[in-house]
Image (spheres, grey):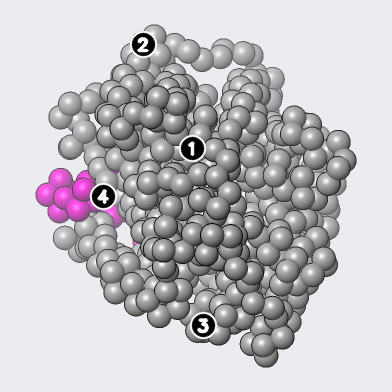
C-alpha cells in the first residue's frame, strides 16, 4: 500500500475535511459572521446580466468550474522536478491555511462592499495610484492566461481526436440548459437530468469514427503547425461569442453543466487512486529529488525549491485568479451571505482534489514513460488518468472512449475559465480606457483575443507564461491584503489573512526575480540558449533573442509593479488598523 498513491490521498482527504468542517466553520463564526438577513448585491442590483441570485448548488458548480482550470493539472507536473513529496505537502497545507481563505474572503469582501470588484475597492483603500497599478497588472495577467490557454486548447483538440466534437456538444448543452433554466423557468433538477443525457451523447459522438474524423490535415512547414493555428482561431471565435453574451445565456449555464464531467473525472481518478493497492498500479516517480531539482545547483540550471515550488503549483493550493472570479462574478450572484462558505471554501477545496488526483496521475508514470510521450506535460495527465481508471471505466468504455473523455475534460477545464478571462479582459478594459474606443465591447474583446492568438501561434507565449506562476500568486497575495485591510477597518481579526498575504507576496516577488535572472542569462548567452519556443526558436533565432531581452524587461516591470502594490496595501493596512479609514457604507435595503 505504501508504494501506491492510496495512502497520501487518504491523508489529504482527512486534512481537507478538517479545513472545511473545523477550521473553516470556526473562522466563519469568528471573523466574518455571515448574516442570512443581510441584503446581498444579487438582490440589491438585480439586472439579469451580472447581478442575479443563484441557488447555492448551482453557484457551487459555477464557482468550481470558473476557478478550476489547467493550473492544478499542469502545476503538479512542473513541481515533480523536486519530487512528489514537496508537491503533496504544498497542495495540502497551501489549501488548508491560505487557498480557501482567499476565495471565501474575496466573495465576502465584495458582498460587504455592495458587489464592487477589486478596481473600485483598491481605489478606496489605496487611492488612484494603487488602482491604476492593480488594473495594469491585471490586464497583463489576463493576457498571459489567454495566450497560454488558447494555445493549449488548440493543441488538445489537435492531439486528442474526438475531443472537439464532444466539447461542441457540451457547449450546445450549456446553451440549451440556460434557456430552459432562465427563460422557461424549468426546475433545476429536470434541467440537470436533460444536461446529463445530452452530455453523454456528446461524449459518445466524440468517440465514434465520425466524431474522431473531425480534424484538420493541413500541411506543416518545419516548426509551423497550421492545424494548431486553425484550432486556435476557432477557439477564439467561441470565446468571442461567450464574452459578449449575457452571463445567463452562455457562460453561466455552460460552466454549470461542465462541472459534472469535470468533477466526475476527479472522482473517478480519486477512486482509481484509492484502489491502487488492489489494481497493482504503483508509484513510479521519486519522492524527493533535491532543493535544486535534478540539475543540482543554480549554476547548472536548477531552480530553487523556494520560491519556485510555491508558484509552480498555483491553482490547487492558492491562485490569484480565484480572487477575480470571486469578487467580480460570484459575489454578484450570491443569494444569502451564509452561502459564501460552501461556495467559496467548498469549491477551493474541491480544486485541491483536482491538484491531488493530477499529482497521482503523474506519479504512476515513470520518467521514462513521460519521456516516451515527448514531454507532453499536460497531455501525459490523460495517460496517467487512463492507467488508474481503466479497471473501473474499462468495464463499460473502450480505451479510445476513455482517452476522448479525459482529453475533452482537459479542454473543458481550460475553455470554461478562458471564457471568463476574455470577459474580464473586456470589463477591465472599460475601467482602464474609460470612454476610449479601446473600451468598446466588440473592440476590446477582439483585441483581447487577437493578441493572445498571435502569441500562441508564434511560440512567444512561452516567455511570459514562465512569469504566470509568479504574477498569479502575487495577485493572490495582494487580494489577501485587500481582505485584510477591510477586516482591519471593521475591527475584525486580521492575523489569519495577513500572515498568508505577507508569505505569498515575498515568495512571489522572489520567484519573479529568479525567472528574470534566467531570461537575462538566456539573452546574454545568445540565440542558441534562448527560452523562446518554436516556431520562432527555429525559424528566427535572432528574434528569439530579442524576445528574451523583452522578457527581462517584462520581469523587471512585474517586479516593480508588485513591489509598489505591496507597499501601497501595507500603508493602507496601517491606516485601517489606526482607525483612519472610513467604514463601509450601508447597502440599500439593509
What whole-number distance in Å separates the C-alpha atoms at marks 3 and 1?
33 Å
- The local crowd at label 3, few if under 14, some if 14 to 19, many if 20 or more residues have their Cα within 10 Å, is some
- The local crowd at label 2, few if under 14, some if 14 to 19, many if 20 or more residues have their Cα within 10 Å, is few
In the image, 41 versus 84, the foreground residue is 41
- 270 drawn magenta: yes
- Of helix, strand and loop, which one carries label 4? helix
Dot 1 or dot 4: first in sequence order is 1
In the image, 28 versus 77, the foreground residue is 28
Dot 2 or dot 4: first in sequence order is 2
Residue 217: image quadrant is: top right
Circle 2 sits on which residue? 209
Relative image position of residue 570 (x, y in whole percent): 69, 80
Range covered by the magenta-colored residues:
269-286
Residue 55, compared with residue 242, is above or below; it is below
Circle 3 sits on which residue? 492
Q: Viewed as shown, does residue 46 lie left or right of 183?
A: right
What whole-number distance in Å separates the C-alpha atoms at marks 3 and 2?
60 Å
Image quadrant in which the N terminus is located: bottom left
Residue 253, compared with residue 340, is above or below; it is above
Q: Viewed as shown, does residue 280 lie left or right of 19?
A: left
Amino acid at each position: 500500500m505504501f508504494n501506491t498513491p492510496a495512502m497520501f490521498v487518504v491523508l489529504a482527504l482527512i486534512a481537507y475535511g478538517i479545513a472545511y468542517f473545523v477550521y473553516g466553520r470556526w473562522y466563519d463564526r469568528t471573523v466574518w459572521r455571515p448574516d442570512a438577513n443581510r441584503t446581498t448585491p444579487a438582490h440589491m442590483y438585480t439586472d439579469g446580466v451580472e447581478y442575479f441570485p443563484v441557488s447555492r448548488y448551482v453557484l457551487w458548480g459555477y464557482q468550481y468550474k470558473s476557478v478550476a482550470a489547467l493550473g492544478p493539472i499542469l502545476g503538479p507536473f512542473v513541481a515533480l522536478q523536486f519530487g512528489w513529496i514537496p508537491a503533496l505537502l504544498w497542495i495540502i497545507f497551501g489549501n488548508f491555511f491560505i487557498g480557501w481563505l482567499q476565495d471565501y474572503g474575496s466573495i465576502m469582501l465584495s458582498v460587504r462592499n455592495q458587489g464592487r470588484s477589486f478596481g473600485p475597492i483598491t481605489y478606496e483603500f489605496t487611492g488612484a495610484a494603487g488602482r491604476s497599478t492593480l488594473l495594469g497588472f491585471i490586464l497583463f495577467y489576463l493576457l498571459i492566461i489567454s495566450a497560454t490557454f488558447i494555445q493549449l486548447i488548440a493543441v488538445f483538440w489537435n492531439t486528442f481526436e474526438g475531443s472537439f466534437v464532444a466539447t461542441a456538444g457540451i457547449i450546445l448543452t450549456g446553451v440549451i440548459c440556460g434557456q430552459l433554466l432562465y427563460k422557461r423557468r424549468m426546475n433545476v433538477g429536470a434541467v440537470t437530468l436533460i444536461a446529463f443525457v445530452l452530455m453523454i451523447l456528446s461524449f459518445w459522438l466524440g468517440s465514434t469514427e465520425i466524431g474522431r474524423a473531425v480534424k484538420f490535415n493541413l500541411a506543416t512547414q518545419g516548426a509551423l503547425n497550421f492545424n494548431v493555428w486553425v484550432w486556435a482561431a476557432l477557439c477564439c471565435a467561441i470565446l468571442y461569442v461567450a464574452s459578449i453574451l449575457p452571463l445567463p445565456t452562455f457562460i453561466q449555464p455552460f460552466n454549470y453543466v461542465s462541472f459534472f464531467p469535470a468533477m466526475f473525472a476527479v472522482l473517478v481518478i480519486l477512486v482509481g487512486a484509492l484502489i491502487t493497492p488492489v489494481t497493482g498500479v504503483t508509484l513510479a516517480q521519486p519522492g524527493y529529488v533535491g532543493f535544486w531539482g535534478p540539475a543540482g545547483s543554480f549554476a547548472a540550471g536548477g531552480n530553487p525549491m523556494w520560491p519556485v515550488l510555491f508558484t509552480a503549483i498555483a491553482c490547487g493550493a492558492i491562485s490569484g485568479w480565484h480572487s477575480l472570479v470571486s469578487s467580480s462574478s460570484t459575489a454578484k450572484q450570491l443569494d444569502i451571505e451564509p452561502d459564501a462558505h460552501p461556495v467559496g471554501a467548498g469549491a477551493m477545496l474541491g480544486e485541491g482534489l483536482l491538484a491531488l488526483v493530477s499529482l497521482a496521475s503523474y506519479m504512476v508514470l515513470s520518467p521514462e514513460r513521460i519521456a516516451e510521450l515527448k514531454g507532453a506535460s499536460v497531455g501525459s495527465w490523460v495517460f496517467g488518468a487512463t492507467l488508474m481508471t481503466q479497471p473501473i471505466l474499462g468495464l463499460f468504455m473502450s480505451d479510445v472512449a476513455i482517452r476522448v473523455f479525459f482529453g475533452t475534460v482537459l479542454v473543458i477545464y481550460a475553455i470554461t475559465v478562458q471564457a471568463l478571462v476574455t470577459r474580464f479582459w473586456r470589463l477591465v478594459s472599460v475601467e482602464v480606457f474609460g470612454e476610449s474606443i479601446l473600451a468598446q465591447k466588440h473592440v476590446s474583446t477582439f483585441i483581447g483575443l487577437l493578441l493572445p492568438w498571435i502569441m500562441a501561434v508564434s511560440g512567444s507565449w512561452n516567455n511570459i507564461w514562465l512569469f504566470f506562476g509568479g504574477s498569479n500568486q502575487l495577485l493572490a497575495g495582494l487580494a489577501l491584503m485587500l481582505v485584510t485591510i477591510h477586516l482591519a477597518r471593521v475591527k475584525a481579526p486580521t492575523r489569519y489573512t495577513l500572515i498568508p498575504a505577507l508569505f505569498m507576496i515575498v515568495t512571489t516577488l522572489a520567484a519573479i526575480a529568479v525567472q528574470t535572472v534566467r531570461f537575462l542569462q538566456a539573452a546574454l548567452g545568445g540565440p542558441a540558449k534562448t527560452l523562446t519556443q518554436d516556431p520562432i526558436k527555429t525559424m528566427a533565432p535572432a528574434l528569439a533573442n530579442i524576445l528574451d531581452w523583452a522578457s527581462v524587461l517584462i520581469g523587471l516591470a512585474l517586479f516593480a509593479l508588485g513591489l509598489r502594490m505591496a507597499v501601497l496595501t501595507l500603508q493602507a493596512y496601517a491606516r485601517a488598523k489606526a482607525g483612519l479609514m472610513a467604514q463601509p457604507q450601508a447597502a440599500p435595503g439593509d
